[in-house]
Image (cartoon, rainbow, N blue to C red):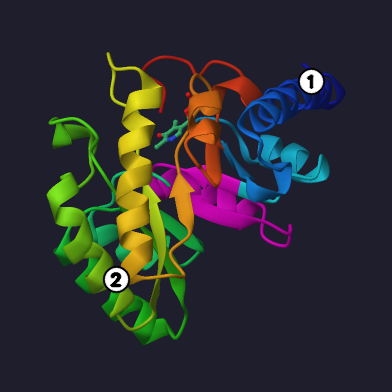
Amino acid sequence: MTDLTRREQIAAGLAEVEARIAGACRAAGRGREELTLVAVTKTYPASDVRILSGLGVRDVGENRDQEAAAKAAETAGLPLTWHFVGQLQTNKVRSVLGYADVIHSVDRIRLVTALSREADRVGREATCLVQVALDDDPSRGGARPGEVPALADALAGARGLRLGGVMAVAPLGEEPDKAFARLRELAQAVRERHPGAEIISAGMSGDLAAAVANGATHLRIGTALLGRRKPFVR
Ligand SMILES: *Cc1c(COP(=O)(O)O)cnc(C)c1O
């Protein structure tokens, strides 16, 4: 496949995603400028990141540190903001803070402590979101809703970190609209205590309209932009 073909494919994916976002914004009475599109590039090569950047995408997301670190290094110099959206182990914190500006997946106090210590050590500020598990299955990451206030307070008070808001993945087997409505309530409660925490990271390829309808500010879109990922290849 030539680069041109791949560029055309990605441009078509981007146009379709933008059309869906525009439709969702119209339906919800919101403006496109209220939303940040994060292109989730996991399993796809750095060359795709370069193409996305050339098409005007400014935010990219990854869920595994090793892959993300390599891609960020390969595309250094492009005007990109890197988002880390995957489950994060404390022993990866140093590496992740080397490239990520926004970490969507903070779900326990130990992680706040580790991130803060490292951000403070290297003298940079990272924006962190509290990831919430919207079902009772924390195996995919995320804090229980009851743990969100304490995590938000901890992030807000941590040196080197900025509390950005909240993030969630819609649970399987539930209307995304219902799940994202709960996320919006949690986000509002966080914002009452921390007015700067305005980010709601919700919405993937299959449920972006429900996310837009429920106040999302950041959409994390992979498949609809880049195509279906190969199973078992991560
Ligand atoms: C892979 C991933 C996405 C993108 O999902 P698509 O369905 O491919 O759009 C979004 N968020 C997280 C946390 C992911 O791991």
Q: Which residue is the site of mark 1? A: 12
Residue 229 x/y as whole percent: 50, 19
Amino acid type at circle 1 is Ala
Q: Disc 2 to disc 1, how far (Cα)? A: 39 Å
Residue 155 - label? 2
Q: Is residue 153 left or right of residue 220?
A: left
Quick check: 223 above or below 156? above
For the residue labelled by badge 2, is the local secondary structure a helix, a strand or a loop?
helix
Residue 152 x/y as whole percent: 27, 65
Residue 84 x/y as whole percent: 44, 51
Q: Is residue 182 left or right of residue 61?
A: left
Q: In which quarter of the image is the N terminus?
A: top right
Quick check: 53 above or below 169? below
Task: Report whether residue 105 is seen.
Answer: no
Task: Report whether residue 101 is seen.
Answer: yes
Tags 2 and 1 touching, CB below 8 Å: no
Labels 2 and 1: the sequence-earlier one = 1
* Label 2 CB less than 8 angstroms from ligand 1: no
Amino acid type at circle 2 is Leu
Q: Nearer the viewer, residue 67 or 63?
A: 63
Q: Which residue is drawn at 68% across and 23% down?
A: 20
User: Mark 2, mark 1: which one is toward the viewer?
Assistant: 2
Q: Residue at x 49, y 26 (%)?
A: 210
The span shown in magenta is: 60-84
Magenta run includes residue 79: yes
Residue 128 x/y as whole percent: 39, 62
Q: Quadrant of residue 222?
A: top right
